[in-house]
Amino acid sequence: MIEKELLKIIDFAIEREKEAVEFYQNLQKMADFSSKKEMLHEFELMEMGHIKTLENLKKEEIEDIKLENIQDLHLSDYLVSAPASEDMSYQNILIIAIKKEEKAYRLYTDLADRQKDEKIKKLFQKLAQEEAKHKQHFEKIYDDEILDNN
């Protein structure tokens, strides 16, 4: 029974990643400069990579999952996200990406905290860890390219 639950969880995560791919595809349609479109395409490809990672996770033994501590830069604590629009700035695109990863991280963390079964808990912790890595990636870009230029 647990293995079926684990597969359902991974499928749930894959669906969230597919939604993220679609989100970035839609933003690309709204972007007004090719440099924004290129960056959003990179984000899209990153999310597609997450789908591949999750598909591979279906083939692994959960016991083999390695968890690591990801440093939270806490930039998102101080950022306010504006709605996506055709004239959004590079800064707003990064904020949207940071906030999206933060929400995914919270979802998986909350789901992990509610689990009694250790395998399922570990799987959600792994998914949360992956989202934390993505958030950290975007926060570093924001720190390097937005905060350092102000």
Image: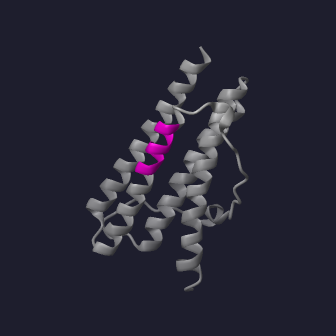
- Work out whether 117 lies above or below 36: above
* Image location of residue 103, percent across then percent down: 56, 48
The residue depicted at 54 percent of the width and 71 percent of the height is 141
* Image location of residue 124, percent across then percent down: 63, 36
Residue occupying the far bottom of the picture: 149
* Image location of residue 23, percent across then percent down: 37, 51
In this picture, which residue range is highlighted in magenta?
Answer: 48-56
The residue depicted at 48 percent of the width and 59 percent of the height is 97
Q: Is the image coloured rainbow, by chain, by secondary structure, or in one colour?
A: one colour
Asked if the stretch drawn in magenta spans residue 95, the answer is no
**In this picture, residue 104 sits left or right of residue 129:** left
- Quadrant of the image for the C terminus? bottom right
The picture quadrant where one finds residue 66 is: top right
Helix, strand or loop for the magenta stretch, by majority = helix
Residue 111 visible in rendering: no
Q: Total label count?
A: 0
The residue depicted at 73 percent of the width and 53 percent of the height is 69
**In this picture, residue 10 sits left or right of residue 128:** left
Residue occupying the far top of the picture: 1
The picture quadrant where one finds residue 57 is: top right
* Image location of residue 28, percent across then percent down: 30, 61
Residue 147 visible in rendering: yes
- Quadrant of the image for the N terminus? top right
The residue depicted at 46 percent of the width and 37 percent of the height is 55
